Amino acid sequence: MSRRTKSLLLLAVVALLVNLPIAHSTWTGWRVDRDGEDVRATVTDTQLVADDGGYLVEFQMPEDIDPDESVWVAQVDRATYDEAIASAQIGVRVLRDDPSAYTVEGQLTSRVGLVVMGLVDLLLLLGAVLLWRGRGRAGHALVLRATGDVERSPPGAGIEKQHDGQYVVSGDVVSLEADRIVLDVEGREVTVLLEGTATRSATSSPRAPPVTSWVE
């Protein structure tokens, strides 16, 4: 696997981790809307958190929904907040088998998380595009012909021009066949066509990750 491919996979994993919480929240909300049950929860506490309409209401589900009598919390609008104080109850839609999955009447949701997730996704997409375009500019595929034996080399990758006009290419093995070896050389895919003794030398140690080959 080339370095570029590994980088793209890493970006994909990061994108998955970033989007997973929002995806889970969306999935839970859809389940509550479809299969939830409307109940009246008992208000245990209220708290003003902002002067622009942000209020917290703490509540407990009916005992048949939540035998543990856990305290849950939601941020609601002013009308719902006033009604919760007056009646000591609040309307909740909840999954009977999962009291942690609920929505509350008049509930307010913050869009900050969505904005942050969108910005991170944009940066990840930009990084993926740059990696892909970088392959097009400096990481294009290259096919060369070996004029000597393929040998093991110290860790590292690169293409070095020799005094006789030939090159030494070193890189990580991507694939190995009878007549060729494909290397990842600093993000560039280099195919080295093997001939004669070069083939025998290469196939004698196929597990050596870095190789060096004289090429034309």
Image (cartoon, rainbow, N blue to C red):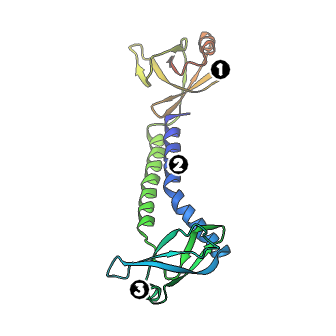
Query: Is residue 82 positioned above or below 132 on the image?
Result: below
* Residue located beneath label 3 in the image: 78
* Residue located beneath label 2 in the image: 12
Query: Is residue 46 toward the left or the right of residue 211 in the image?
Result: left
Disc ID at residue 179: 1
Query: Is residue 67 positioned above or below 167 on the image?
Result: below
Query: Quick one: SS at disc 3?
Result: helix
Outermost residue on the top side: it is 197
Query: Is residue 192 toward the left or the right of residue 137 in the image?
Result: right
**Residue at screen point 45% across, 90% down:** 86
- List x then y, in percent, for residue 135: 48, 40
Identify which residue, 136 or 128, lies in the foreground: 128
Identify which residue, 28 or 57, lies in the foreground: 57
Quadrant of res 199? top right
Query: Quick one: SS at disc 1?
Result: loop
- List x then y, in percent, for residue 59: 50, 76
Amino acid identity at mark 3: Arg
Query: Which numbered disc flags the more N-terminal residue, 3 or 2?
Result: 2
- List x then y, in percent, for residue 78: 41, 86
Query: Which numbered disc flags the more N-terminal residue, 2 or 1?
Result: 2
Q: Select label 2 or label 1 by which is in front.
A: 2
Identify which residue, 41 or 35, lies in the foreground: 41
- Mark-to-mark CA distance, 3 and 2: 41 Å
- List x then y, in percent, for residue 113: 43, 65
